[in-house]
Amino acid sequence: MLKRFLQIFILLLTLFGSLRLYYNKQIGDVIDNYNGVEIYFNSIPFTSKGESLNEDGYKFGEKYQALEFVKRYYFERYNYKFPEKFDSIEKLYNSTLKDGEKNSELGLVQYSNLSAYPFKEEDIILFKPTIYNPQGHIAIISKVEENSIEIIQQNFWKTTRKNIDIEKINNLWHIKDNKILGRLQK
């Protein structure tokens, strides 16, 4: 039994070590930036490296997580601070609001994934929780094209940018990804 446990332990250590070599990055290395706001490498998703704070103590979140990047981005770009109670992705989307209605607690406009309002760069995209990511995910639109958007994100392995198809159905904008909750806009 102990021998089997040691074999599994050594296998896991080898796997994690191989991933580090594959990525050729150290945790906390800058791997991209958007509008001058840096995106950091976090190795394996879901790992935490402590809190990320600004000089006055405002908490961006856990270092190198997706939410930390979005909160830090909005602070650096707009001097916007998310209210403290919004410390997780699932708390950001208010399902009782209508498309295009302002979330008065957040101070941001909320849009559904079938929206009368077009996408804009710097919109925040909110992803539903999944079995692989029970907290959900969050990213920022970095580019809007006719048939797709590009999102920029932190803590999604070594990928920081991803294109997602969009479509217009009966004059409503839709992101073609069933994991999308909606989006927020300053």
Image (tube, helix red, strand yellow):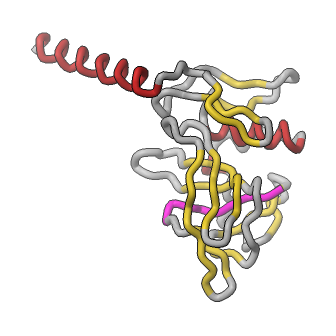
Q: Is residue 47 above or below residue 181?
A: above
Give the image quarter of residue 86.
top right
Instruction: Single out the residue that lies furthest toward the bottom.
Output: 170
- The residue sitting at 69% across, 50% down in the picture is 140
- The residue sitting at 40% across, 49% down in the picture is 131
Give the image quarter of residue 182.
bottom right
The stretch of residues the image draws in magenta is: 178-186
Q: Nearer the viewer, residue 145 or 126?
A: 145
Residue 149 in percent (x, y) is at 64, 61
Residue 88 in percent (x, y) is at 64, 42
Give the image quarter of residue 11.
top left
Q: Nearer the viewer, residue 173 or 84?
A: 173
Magenta-drawn stretch contains 132:
no
- The residue sitting at 59% across, 47% down in the picture is 161
Q: Is residue 17 above or below residue 156?
A: above
Q: Is residue 20 left or right of residue 109?
A: left
Image quadrant for the C terminus? bottom right
- The residue sitting at 51% across, 65% down in the picture is 177
